[in-house]
Amino acid sequence: MKLNNVFSTGVLILLCVTIKQWYQFPNRWRQEVNFMGLNHITGGNGKHGWLVDRNGKIKIEKSDEAIKRIKVSISMFALDYMNPNPGNFSLSLQGLSKVGNALPGL
């Protein structure tokens, strides 16, 4: 079975924050955050990220840093971090050190 779409929604009652997220795999997403009447809407189409500004206009993020963030987000959505040879992530052991009475490696 292949996962193609995900929708999640949640409410943080203490802060009155509503969060809605949509993902269409592998590379499209939208997130709406409503914090006590202040809305923040962002999304992406796989090539560019975008956000809706306070005037209701869509601002497309085209900077190099934004493109890097999108590539990482797409990889995370695709669960690429679980691939043993992903090309986008690396994991290395930097060594062990004792903290308090804890034994290294446990």
Image (cartoon, grey):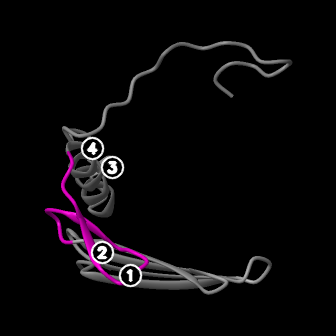
Residue type, label 1: Asn
Q: Earlier in the sequence, mark 2 or mark 3?
A: 2
For disc 4, the marked residue is: 65
Residue type, label 4: Glu
Is residue 5 shown above or below 101?
below
Q: Where residue 29 is drawn, which disc sits there? A: 2
Q: Residues within 10 Å of mark 1 (few under 14, many from 20)?
A: few
The reply to whether the magenta stretch includes residue 23 is no
Q: Earlier in the sequence, mark 2 or mark 4?
A: 2
Location of the C terminus by quadrant is top right
The residue most toward the right is 101
Q: Are marks 2 and 1 in contact (CB under 8 Å)?
A: no
Q: Are marks 1 and 4 in contact (CB under 8 Å)?
A: no
Looking at the rendered image, the disc whose residue lies closer to the viewer, 1 or 4, is 1
CA gap, disc 2 to disc 1? 21 Å
Residue type, label 2: Trp
Q: Earlier in the sequence, mark 2 or mark 1?
A: 2
Q: Where residue 41 is drawn, which disc sits there? A: none
* Residue 4 percent across, percent down from the top left: 24, 81
Q: Where residue 82 is drawn, which disc sits there? A: 3
CA gap, disc 2 to disc 3? 20 Å
Is residue 24 shown above or below 106?
below
For disc 1, the marked residue is: 55
Is residue 94 shown above or below 25?
above
CA gap, disc 1 to disc 4? 24 Å
Residues rendered magenta in the picture: 45-63
Looking at the rendered image, the disc whose residue lies closer to the viewer, 2 or 1, is 1
**Residue located 18% across and 55% down the image:** 62
Number of numbered markers: 4
Q: Secondary structure at mark 2?
A: strand
CA gap, disc 3 to disc 1? 40 Å
Is residue 40 shown above or below 76?
below
